[in-house]
Structure formats: C-alpha cells, structure tokens
Image (cartoon, rainbow, N blue to C red):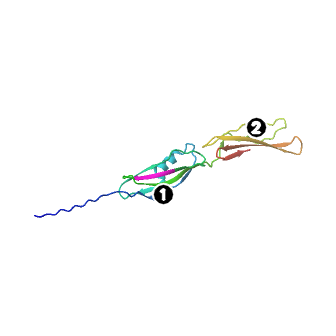
Amino acid sequence: GNKTTVSQTITVQDTKAPVITTQATNIEVECDGSANTTSLNSWLASNGGAVATDNCSDVIWTNNFTSLTDSCGTTPATVIFTVTDACGNTSTSSATFKIKDTKAPTFTIPAPASVTVQCDAVPTAQTLSATDTCSTVLVTFNEVRTDGSCINDNILTRTWTATDICGNATSVS
C-alpha cells in the first residue's frame, strides 16, 4: 500500500455587499395631530419600502432617523436605510418622510346670523374661536362699513378668519 494524499483549502469570504433590489420611497402624509407616529413607524419598520438580498446570509436593516422638525412639511426627515449582512457588508437607500398640513382650521362657534337693526341697536362683534388638528390657530376680525343712501343706513360686514401656522385659512362672515 502506497498512498498519496492531496488536500485543498478553500477560504470562503463574503466581501460582497447586499444588493438593494427596491429603493426606499419618499412618503408624504397629511398631518394627523399626533406627529403621524403610526404612519412614520410603519414606514420605518418597512425600511421605507426598500428590499435587499444577499448572496451569503440574511440581512438586517437599520436607519438613522432621529426626529421631524416641522409639522407643515417644510423640513422633511431624510432617512438613510442601511442593510447589513452577517459579515458587516452594507448598502444604503435614502428617502424622505414629510408631513403636510392642507386642512384649514374649523370654527368652534358659527358666525352670528345676519340681522337688520336700528342704528342704536348694532350688536357688539362676537369673539369667535377655531381649532386645527395640527397647530395653533390665530383668529382675526375685520369689519367693513358700506354706506347706504341715507347717512344712518349702512351695512356692516363682519369677517372672522382663522389661520393655522401652515397658512391654511377659513373665513366666516
């Protein structure tokens, strides 16, 4: 028995980064008054919609999200989603999460009804208030007098305008 032994050493290395097959997508949601935590958390949990595969192992997703800075959507959060394989190889995809506020405030009390009165019985203008789902509201009042044919005949048009911090407004007269 003569015998010859030959051996081969194969070194397997994973140096290839995961491949992102679907990039993360931007999302824009209407303000819900609760910092859109449900929509935001769902978007973050789904990696912004990004999908990745790796040739050697499962992957883990992380992101760099910290906070949103504005409820009107003028400063969206840009989030970088990072996918990492078991050997530490990474790829990234980024997208933005934006909150928009397009809904005008709502008056909590309706405008007073139109009335015809004598010149000494003009009612005092009411103070109206309004609410908004996403922000504080400023209510302004304006009164315009239109003279009639007689010095004591006139029409007072009273207008209340409610404006939120995003510039959405509604008026009642």
| Number of numbered discs on residues | 2
Crowd around label 1: few <14 · some 14–19 · many ≥20 (10 Å): some
Residue 152, percent from left and from top: 87, 40
Determine the residue located farthest toward the left in the rendered image: 1
Do the numbered discs 1 and 2 sit on residues whose CB atoms are within 8 Å?
no
Answer left or right for 62 relative to 33: left
Outermost right residue: 150
Which element is circle 1 on? loop
Q: Earlier along the polypeptide chain: callout 1 or callout 2?
A: 1
Instruction: Return the residue nearer the eye: 64 or 70.
Output: 64
Residue 106: x and y in percent read 65, 43
Residue 153: x, y in percent? 86, 42
Indicate the amino acid at tag 2. Answer: Ala
The magenta segment is 79-84
- Mark 2 Cα-neighbour bin, 10 Å: few <14, some 14–19, many ≥20: few
- Asked where in the image residue 123 lies, by quadrant, the reply is top right
Q: Amino acid at mark 1?
A: Gln
Which residue does the image show at 16% across and 63% down from the upper left? 4
Choose mark 1 or mark 2, whichever is in front. Answer: 1
Tag shown at residue 23: 1
SS label for mark 2: loop
Residue linked to disc 2: 125
Q: CA distance from mark 1 to mark 2?
A: 57 Å
